Amino acid sequence: MPTKSQLKIGNKTIEVSNLGKVFYPKTGFTKGQTIDYYIRVSPVLLPHLKNRPITLKRYPDGVDGLFFYEKRCPPHRPGWIETHPVSRTEGGTIDYCVMNSLSALVWAVNLADLELHVFLHRVPKIMQPTAVVFDLDPGAPAGILDCGRTALQLKSFLEKLNLKSFPKTSGSKGLQVYVPLNGTVTYEQTKTFARAVAGELERASPQTVVSNMQKRLRKGKVFVDWSQNDDHKTTVCVYSMRAKDWPSVSTPVEWGELESALNKNQAGMLAFEPGDVLKRVDRNGDLFAPVLKLKQNLPPLDFA
């Protein structure tokens, strides 16, 4: 594979380099393969990135090397990379990159931005999240199947509130469940709702579920993290690769798949690499498409 190459994307020419560099040493997966994956998955990925400020998580020496988060869009960016100011908790603003095109995405991945971490809002409506997210994080020895059980409990609870939800793997240890809203709610409303629901799940299953933020309480349980519903936090985007030992991907799944994995006790059924994801997209389209458009209303917190 050549060291440098130029990709013509629309009316933009993107220079990509070090395509043969191994990003995942344990599998030999290269930078070139990473860029290829993102190009091929872009038809379903880009709608989820649209108008969302993004934090770059860069691994210039691959997943075994040092990495760094880059909130401020690099000053050496091309002039056509879109940015948007986001307020800082300590005051002032940061100009974040916005990945609204394939050319922008390829530019970022060429900077070794393996993981795509986005806000739950779209610009310019930076105080209006488009969804509620529940991040299910297993505390060892609990694992992803335990997260699956909790996710199904969460789905059942939300259905009683007339809310549809959509699961995806985190690409790491756990699962994430999205409740699309696409309305005019605030982060204060979504965070309050998520915390109340997490508390209800813990009360229903105190031996397996925890909603308290203290890490010492998570051993052997699934932590239902409600705190991601915040205007200063980002969550890994659907279809993003993850910097693990192998090139895993945060992948949307169907509820029936979770049930099947639990029935067969097969955690591997919830682990996906880039090739797996591309085949799934060819077969199923974007299972997370409803998250972009489905309008739902948060119910009163009568259960809390």
Image: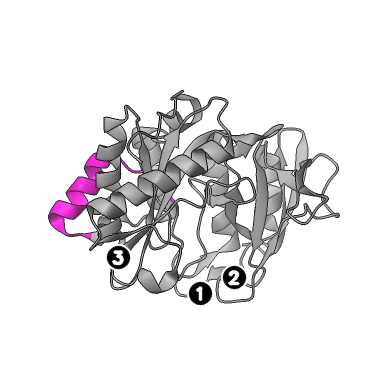
**Marks 3 and 2, Cα distance to the nearest angstrom?**
31 Å
Q: Are marks 2 and 1 in contact (CB under 8 Å)?
A: yes
**Three-letter amino acid code at disc 2?**
Gly
Q: How crowded is mark 3: few (under 14 residues within 10 Å), some or many (20 or more)?
A: many
**Three-letter amino acid code at disc 3?**
Lys
**Marks 3 and 1, Cα distance to the nearest angstrom?**
32 Å
Judged from the image, the secondary structure of the residue bearing numbered disc 2 is loop
Question: Residue 221 bears which disc, if any?
Answer: 3
The residue at which mark 2 appears reads as 62
Residue nearest the observer in this picture, 200 or 33: 200
Residue 73 image position (x, y, % from top left): 77, 52
Q: Nearer the viewer, mark 3 or mark 2?
A: 3
Residue 190 image position (x, y, % from top left): 50, 39
Q: Can residue 33 be seen in this view?
A: yes
Question: Which of the marked residues, 2 or 1, is nearer the chain's N terminus?
Answer: 1
Q: Start and end of the magenta stretch?
A: 250-266
**Three-letter amino acid code at disc 1?**
Pro
User: Which of the 4 quarters of the picture holds residue 246?
Assistant: bottom left
Q: Nearer the viewer, mark 3 or mark 1?
A: 3
The residue at which mark 1 appears reads as 25
Residue lying farthest to the left in this orientation: 263
Please report the residue visible at 43 percent of the width from the left and 48 percent of the height from the top: 195
Please report the residue visible at 43 percent of the width from the left and 44 percent of the height from the top: 194
Quick one: quadrant of the C terminus?
top left
- Residue 265 covered by magenta stretch: yes
Q: Residues within 10 Å of mark 2 (few under 14, many from 20)?
A: many
Residue nearest the observer in this picture, 109 or 58: 58
Question: Which of the marked residues, 3 or 1, is nearer the chain's N terminus?
Answer: 1
Judged from the image, the secondary structure of the residue bearing numbered disc 1 is loop
